[in-house]
Image: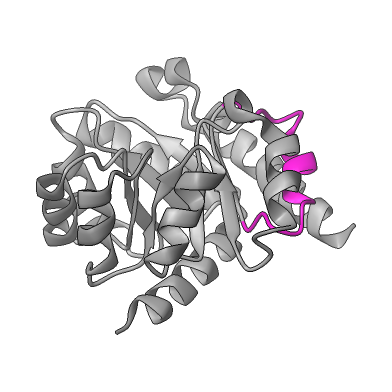
Amino acid sequence: MSIAQHQHRAEQLLHAAGILPVVTVHTLDQACGVAAALLEGGLPAIELTLRTPIAIEALAMLKRELPDVAVGAGTVLTVEQMQQAIDAGADFLVTPGTPPHMAEALAAAPLPVVPGAASPTELLALMARGFRVCKLFPASAVGGLSMIRGVGGPMPELKLCPTGGITEATAADYLKQPNVVCIGGSWMVNDAWVRGGEWDKIKASASAAAAIVRQARAG
């Protein structure tokens, strides 16, 4: 498949997700419990960060045990991590930022990719490589809604997944922007809930998040 086809698939995946929970786990049990609770709550995709030693193993396990969850590998920082995530069965890849050597490797990846950027210059560089779906990170720190509205004019074909600093209270405002295909957030996977195995709380928060998506898109 071409990069254009992979980018179309990335847009489909993110639109179906609406809100992409950014998940960090320290055990396989946590990974399974969190993903199942999010799915039951109505959030069918996750960004599983590669910030812990267990992450790649957890990704592979989730693809075996919970095939209905779209699992993206997040915080992909190196080409080696990119390949490990692909080998583990990741459905898509997400980076917090995208230096040129990573952009080159990601453009050739055999699956959907959501490369990260923090400025119009970085976004334009990614667009020049064929990317049309990008992660804006850290969204609130680089201008939030003002930045998103600002780049919408000169880059109307670019779809964004802003992540970083978005809360349950601000989620709807981001989702209502025409160039936002999805938002990333971690409020529904509170670290204390994850460590304590409080899956019911995660499920309830995910259900509320899914309702935000429906309401924002209906409006």
Q: Residue at x 28, y 66 (%)?
A: 107
Quick check: 122 left or right of 203?
left
Q: Residue at x 42, y 65 (%)?
A: 128
> What is the residue that sits farthest to the bottom in this orientation?
1
> What is the residue that sits farthest to the right in this orientation?
219
* Residue 36, visible in the rendered structure: no
The secondary structure that most of the magenta stretch takes on is loop
Indicate yes or no whether the magenta region holds residue 180. yes
Q: What x and y, as percent, mark residue 52?
A: 20, 27
Front-most of residues 11 and 211: 11
Front-most of residues 158 and 218: 158
Decide: is 191 above or below 3: above
Q: Residue at x 48, y 76 (%)?
A: 8
Quick check: 49 left or right of 141?
left
Q: How is the image coloured?
A: one colour
* Residue 14, visible in the rendered structure: yes
Quick check: 80 left or right of 180?
left
Q: What x and y, as percent, mark residue 12?
A: 53, 71
> Which residues make up the magenta segment?
165-181
Q: What x and y, as percent, mark residue 51?
A: 25, 29
